[in-house]
């Protein structure tokens, strides 16, 4: 049985209002009031909002700074990157259905027409349709319906898939900057930040902007120009990300961007193959 000066969660001797072992707050009698509950909820919402906005602004104004600070042990000033990415995914999921799925999630026809394994996927789709006694068009309908229902959520798979790419970048940078030392945890943080950057810049803001412009100005040249501008801005943010996160010179950052983009495009191809078998 825990005594008064011990944490009721882990029985560690208490020093102050919070347990230094598990982080649990000591609940006093004055805390068990409706007034305190309302005040606590209000503080949580305003504190959450402030951290969320600050982290989002930092993500765009100083890409890579969050990863650098977290690798140095500075975490309390930022909203959790996992929560940030999940909120971004929820926003993207709730966007109108006419907003496209981007370069990650391809519809059925695009899956069969593009990619390294397109011939094998065509053969697999035909055999699957025969085994289920349906035609390929029906299979395409099923696939596209699943894509619309779950495609936006499944982009979360890109977080673990990006880590090996960042590991390769890390190896390259260490050959140039000997004192660089990013751990596996730091690479996971970097993957969360860079995928959050992609999620908000391309999927949420970029595709939303392109979708609206496509409705207002149905001109291929205008929409294409906007898309190119978004992609260029994203590459610039990648450059700033590596420069800030790894504290490297400009030419090393360009080198890191080239390695990352090559590896990331391969990762996108792997993602497309995985989603093909998930949704078909």
Image (spheres, rainbow, N blue to C red):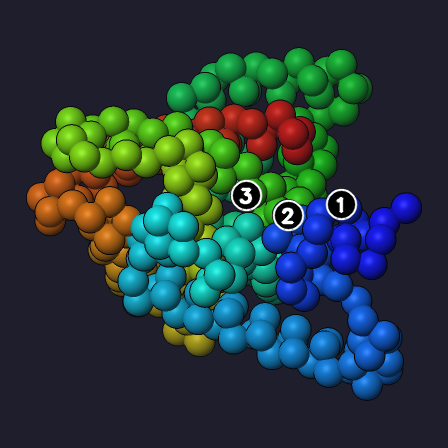
Q: Return the disc, 1 or 3, that comes first in the chain's sequence.
A: 1
Mark 1 against mark 3, which lies toward the viewer? Answer: 1
* Nearer to the camera, 181 or 261: 181
The alpha-carbon separation of the residues under discs 1 and 3 comes to 38 Å
Report if residue 129 is visible in the image: yes
Which residue in the structure is indicated by mark 1?
10
Task: Look at the picture and state if 72 lies above or below 112.
Answer: below
Q: Determine which residue is flagged by label 3.
A: 155
Which quadrant holds the C terminus? top right
243 in relation to 280, above or below: below
Badge 3 density bin: few <14, some 14–19, many ≥20, Cα 10 Å: some
What secondary structure is found at the residue carrying circle 1?
loop
Mark 2 or 3: the one toward you: 2
Q: Is residue 119 above or below residue 109?
A: above
Residue 32 in the image, given as x and y percentages of width and height: 86, 75
Q: In the visual, does 27 lie left or right of 166? A: right
Q: Which image quarter: residue 186? A: top left
Tell me: 39 left or right of 248: right
Q: Secondary structure at mark 3?
A: helix
Q: Residues within 10 Å of mark 1 (few under 14, many from 20)?
A: few
| Earlier residue among tags 2 and 3 | 2
**Element marked by disc 2:** loop
In space, the residues marked 1 and 2 are separated at their CA atoms by: 8 Å
- Quadrant location of residue 48? bottom right
Q: Are marks 1 and 2 in contact (CB under 8 Å)?
A: yes
Side of 57 relative to 138 (left or right): left
Q: Is residue 85 visible?
A: no
In the rendered structure, find residue 21 and report the number of the disc placed on it.
2
Point out the tag, 1 or 2, that comes first from the N-terminus: 1
In the image shown, does 20 or 157 lie closer to the viewer? 20
* Residue located at (62% from left, 21% from top): 125
């Amino acid at each position: 049985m825990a005594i008064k000066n011990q944490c009721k969660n882990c029985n560690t001797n208490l020093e102050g209002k919070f347990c230094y072992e598990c982080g649990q707050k000591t609940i006093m009698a004055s805390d068990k009031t409706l007034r305190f509950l309302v005040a606590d909820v209000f503080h949580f919402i305003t504190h959450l909002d402030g951290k969320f906005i600050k982290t989002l602004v930092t993500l765009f104004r100083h890409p890579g700074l969050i990863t650098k600070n977290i690798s140095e042990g500075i975490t309390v000033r930022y909203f959790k990157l996992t929560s940030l990415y999940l909120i971004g995914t929820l926003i993207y999921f709730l966007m109108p259905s006419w907003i496209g799925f981007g370069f990650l999630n391809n519809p059925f026809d695009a899956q069969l027409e593009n990619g390294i394994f397109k011939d094998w996927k065509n053969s697999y789709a035909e055999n699957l349709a025969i085994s289920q006694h349906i035609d390929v068009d029906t299979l395409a309908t099923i696939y596209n319906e699943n894509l619309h229902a779950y495609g936006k959520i499944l982009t979360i798979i890109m977080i673990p898939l990006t880590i090996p790419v960042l590991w390769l970048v890390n190896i390259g940078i260490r050959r140039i900057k000997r004192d660089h030392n990013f751990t596996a945890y730091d690479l996971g943080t970097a993957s969360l930040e860079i995928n959050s950057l992609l999620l908000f810049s391309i999927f949420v803001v970029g595709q939303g902007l392109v979708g609206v412009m496509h409705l207002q100005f149905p001109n291929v040249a205008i929409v294409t120009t906007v898309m190119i501008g978004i992609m260029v801005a994203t590459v610039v943010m990648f450059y700033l990300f590596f420069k800030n996160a790894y504290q490297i010179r400009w030419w090393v950052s360009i080198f890191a961007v080239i390695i990352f983009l090559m590896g990331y495009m391969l990762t996108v191809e792997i993602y497309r193959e995985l989603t093909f078998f998930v949704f078909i």
